[in-house]
């Protein structure tokens, strides 16, 4: 009977060692691996959901890009590589004539360097109805050359006849030729 109890105890101990060995060397490593696989799966699912959300934004971003391209449009062409100041001044004079503006004065200032661009300040002065002056500005804005209006001064005449004297400080730009330096 003692032998039988020892044998049962040995069998129980052997079974416990086998179960312990199985738990220690098989079950626990597999559980760790499963946990790391679940974490990797969760990370991949998060990355997929982010990519999916970002891919839904692509049409919006493409539309914004197209709008910016339309806005910027021919920016490089609007800043010529040559000074062409005489041509620009003639175009301004023609626009003033087109809108029947009187007492025209257009004077270029001293050329300056602004980064990679050269700029020429231009003082413009004329007299006319406010509506004529606004149409003139609208046409200046539509020129194929970039013009930045720095300062505008509108002064009503003393007789209140509807005539306005306009003084504008504008700047035009041109890119220096690559050969210049």
Image: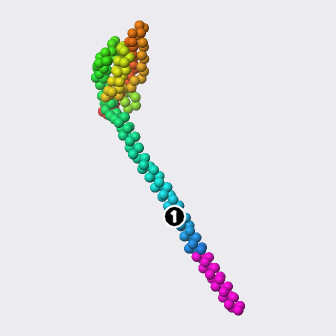
Residue at the far top in the pictured view = 159
Question: Tell me, what colour scheme is on the image?
Answer: rainbow
State the image quarter where residue 9 is shown: bottom right
Counting other residues with Cα less than 10 Å from the Cα at mark 1, is it few (<14), some (14-19), or many (20 or more)?
few
Residue at the far right in the pictured view = 2
What residue lies at 47% left-to-right and 52% top-to-bottom?
50
Residue 153 at x, y percent in the picture: 42, 17
What residue lies at 34% left-to-right and 35% top-to-bottom?
73
Q: Quadrant of the C terminus?
A: top left
Q: In the picture shown, does residue 71 fall above or below 172? A: below
Residue 109 at x, y percent in the picture: 37, 19
Residue 70 at x, y percent in the picture: 35, 36
Which structural element holds mark 1?
helix
State the image quarter where residue 72 is shown: top left
Nearer to me, 110 or 161? 161
Residues in magenta? Answer: 1-22
State the image quarter where residue 177 is shown: top left
Describe residue 82's horizontal placement relative to residue 29 as left or right. Answer: left
**Residue 93 seen:** no
Describe residue 15's horizontal placement relative to residue 68 as left or right. Answer: right
Residue tagged by mark 1? Answer: 37
Q: Quadrant of the N terminus?
A: bottom right
* Magenta span includes 3: yes
* Magenta span includes 92: no
Q: In the picture shown, does residue 45 fall above or below 76? A: below
């Amino acid at each position: 009977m003692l032998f039988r109890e020892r044998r049962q105890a040995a069998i129980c101990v052997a079974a416990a060692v086998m179960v312990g060995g199985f738990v220690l060397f098989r079950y626990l490593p597999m559980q760790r691996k499963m946990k790391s696989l679940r974490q990797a799966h969760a990370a991949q699912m998060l990355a997929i959901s982010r990519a999916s959300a970002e891919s839904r934004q692509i049409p919006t971003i493409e539309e914004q890009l197209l709008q910016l391209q339309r806005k910027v449009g021919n920016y490089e062409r609007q800043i010529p590589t040559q000074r062409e100041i005489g041509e620009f001044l003639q175009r301004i004079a023609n626009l003033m004539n087109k809108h029947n503006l009187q007492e025209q004065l257009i004077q270029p200032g001293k050329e300056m360097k602004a980064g990679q661009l050269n700029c020429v300040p231009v003082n413009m002065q004329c007299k006319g109805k406010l509506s004529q002056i606004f149409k003139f500005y609208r046409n200046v804005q539509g020129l194929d050359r970039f013009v930045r209006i720095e300062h505008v001064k509108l002064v009503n005449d003393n007789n209140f006849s509807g005539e306005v004297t306009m003084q504008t400080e504008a700047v035009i730009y041109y890119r220096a030729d690559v050969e210049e330096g």
